Image (cartoon, grey):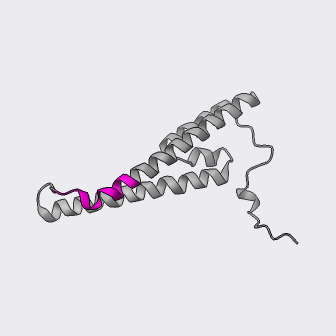
Amino acid sequence: MSLEPRVPPKFTEPATGRNLTRQAAWGCVVSNLVLPGLGTFLAHRRVVGILQLVVSQTGFALSLIWAILFVREWIRQGSFPEDVAPHLALGLIGVTIFLLAWIGSLASSVGILYTSRKSGL
C-alpha cells in the first residue's frame, strides 16, 4: 500500500494530453486574458488552471477590499482622503498578486498554442 497522496483523476494532468484545435486553443488564450486560469482549466490543465484561478482571484479580492476601504473613508470624510497610505499596501499587494497570476496564465497560453500547433489540428 502506497503512502503517497492520491489526487482524483479528474484533476490530474492527462499523461498524453488532449489535443486542442487551433481555434479552441485561441479560445483558451482569450479566456486566460479575461480571467487568468480559466483558459488553462478549459485546456484540460486542471491543476495549473485552478491554481491560477485561485491566485488571481485572491489578488482581485485584496484589491477590491482596498477599494472598498478607500471609498468608505472617502464617504466618511466627505472629501477625497488626504492619507491613502493606511491600506494602500493591501491594494498594491493585491494588484501584484493578480499581475503575477496573469503573467503565469500568459505563459500557459503560449504552451497551449504551441501544443495545438504541434498537434496540427
* Residue found farthest to the left: 78
Horizontal side, residue 94 vs residue 72: left or right: right
- Residue drawn 70% across the image and 37% down it: 20
* Residue found farthest to the right: 1
**Residue 97 located within the stretch drawn in magenta:** no
**Residue 88 located within the stretch drawn in magenta:** yes
Quadrant housing the N terminus: bottom right
Q: Is residue 121 visible?
A: no
- Residue drawn 62% across the image and 49% down it: 41
- Residue drawn 65% across the image and 36% down it: 111
Residue 45 image point, x, y percent: 67, 48
Quadrant housing the C terminus: top right
Above or below for 49 versus 6: above
Q: Which residues are magenta?
A: 83-93
Above or below for 105 versus 11: above
Residue 84 image point, x, y percent: 22, 56
Q: Main secondary structure of the magenta part?
A: helix
Above or below for 117 versus 85: above
